[in-house]
Amino acid sequence: MTMDITKSIAFTGHRSERICQAGMLHLYLDIVSEVRRLYSLGYRNFLSGMAEGFDLLAAQAVASLKTEYTDIHLIAVVPFRQQSNRYRPENKSLYDRMMKVADEVVTLHEDYRKGCFLHRNDYLVDNSEIALAYWDKQPYGGTYYTVGKARMMNRTIINLYK
């Protein structure tokens, strides 16, 4: 599939531990609402790094809209093939389901290697026009890095953190 970055959104957000578990349903509904809005503006490609937490929640939101929007695409961007091996069982199950419904899977490395997560984050920003984020504005971690790169590349950033 050839991807037009002007019609592409990248998800970036915290892992489950930095998201209030009680707020996961609200966050999911916020993601669905924002994906609907972006779809109405012509965006069709939604890239998820497939990490536990926000990434998988966002992938699930896109997957749930596939029956309504038949031309919406979920692109799974995987830093290395065995990414989900250490996931909690419920997240591993969700990961496996999302990998099956993804329209495209981009696997950046066969095996884990130093810097592979940053490579994945770079790929997300390089291949999208907008970063849809859940960032608590703390100056550390992968989401901080990805939002910073998106800013540096003059990408639009939508932060769902409240």
Image (cartoon, rainbow, N blue to C red):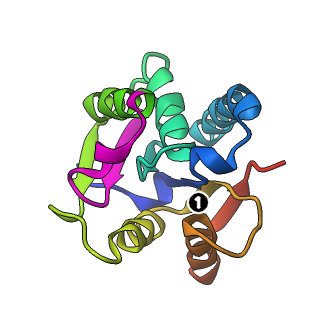
Outermost residue, left direction? 110
x and y percentages locating residue 41 in the rendered image: 62, 43
| 66 sits to left or right of 32 | left
In magenta, the rendered stretch is 71-89
Q: What residue sits 35% from the left and 27% below the top?
A: 93
Q: What residue sits 40% from the left and 24% below the top?
A: 70
Q: What residue sits 62% from the left and 69% below the top?
A: 147
| 110 sits to left or right of 73 | left
Outermost residue, bottom direction? 152
Determine if the magenta segment contains residue 62.
Answer: no
Q: Is residue 118 above or below residue 96?
A: below
Q: Which residue is mark 1?
A: 130
Q: Which quadrant of the view contains residue 136?
A: bottom right
Amino acid at the residue labelled 1: Ile
Determine if the magenta segment contains residue 81.
Answer: yes
Q: Which quadrant of the view contains residue 72?
A: top left
x and y percentages locating residue 53 in the rendered image: 55, 43
Count of numbered marks: 1
Q: Nearer the viewer, residue 137 or 69?
A: 137
Q: Is residue 53 above or below residue 60?
A: below
x and y percentages locating residue 68 in the rendered image: 49, 17
x and y percentages locating residue 142 in the rendered image: 54, 67
